[in-house]
Amino acid sequence: MAVVVFTAVLSDDDRTRAVCFQALELFAVWPLFLAGLLCLVSGVTLGVGSRYGLVRYWWVATKLAVSIVLITLVPLALRPGLAGLSERGRELAAGHLGTVSVGDMIYPPIVSPAALLFALVLAVFKPWGRIRSRWGRA
């Protein structure tokens, strides 16, 4: 997604921009959503089957929350924006001139890798320790 978005941003050719805008709708939403679900399922499976547990440590719970937020953002925030951008790309390809920019679509290729890098750092350094229960057990 980042390659296509930044190609559209940096290109001066309207045809290239139109193709990029249309391509985003084709491969960005469902593959990202399904890959996110696969990561969530594998993370939950590893969390349940390992000594760290699913919500026994703060770093694991934080990674779970980051994963859920990213998966939720795909259909709620990314999909509507890409649909509008794809329509503008079709208009541009048909020869209708106008101001067409990626607008808010520049943020997902920046935010998603940053969040995944944060999750990677959590997995490597395992900060914050255990989550305490109400009864004082650790």
Image: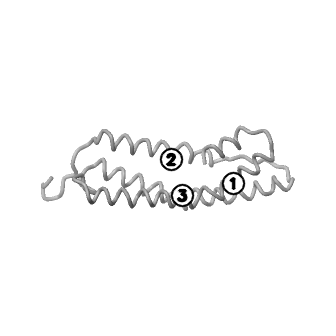
Residue 107 point in image, percent of width and height = 58, 45
The secondary element bearing badge 1 is classed as helix
Residue denoted by label 1:
23
Residue 74 numbered mark, or none: 3
The Cα atoms of the two marked residues, 1 and 2, are separated by: 19 Å
- Residue type marked 1: Ala
At label 1, counting other C-alpha atoms closer than 10 Å, the crowd grade (few under 14, some 14-19, many 20 or more) is some
The secondary element bearing badge 2 is classed as helix
The secondary element bearing badge 3 is classed as helix
Residue closest to the eye, 97 or 10: 10
Residue denoted by label 2:
112
Name the residue rendered at 62%, 57% in the picture.
27
The Cα atoms of the two marked residues, 3 and 2, are separated by: 10 Å
Name the residue rendered at 30%, 38% in the picture.
125
The Cα atoms of the two marked residues, 1 and 3, are separated by: 16 Å
First-in-chain label (1 vs 2)? 1
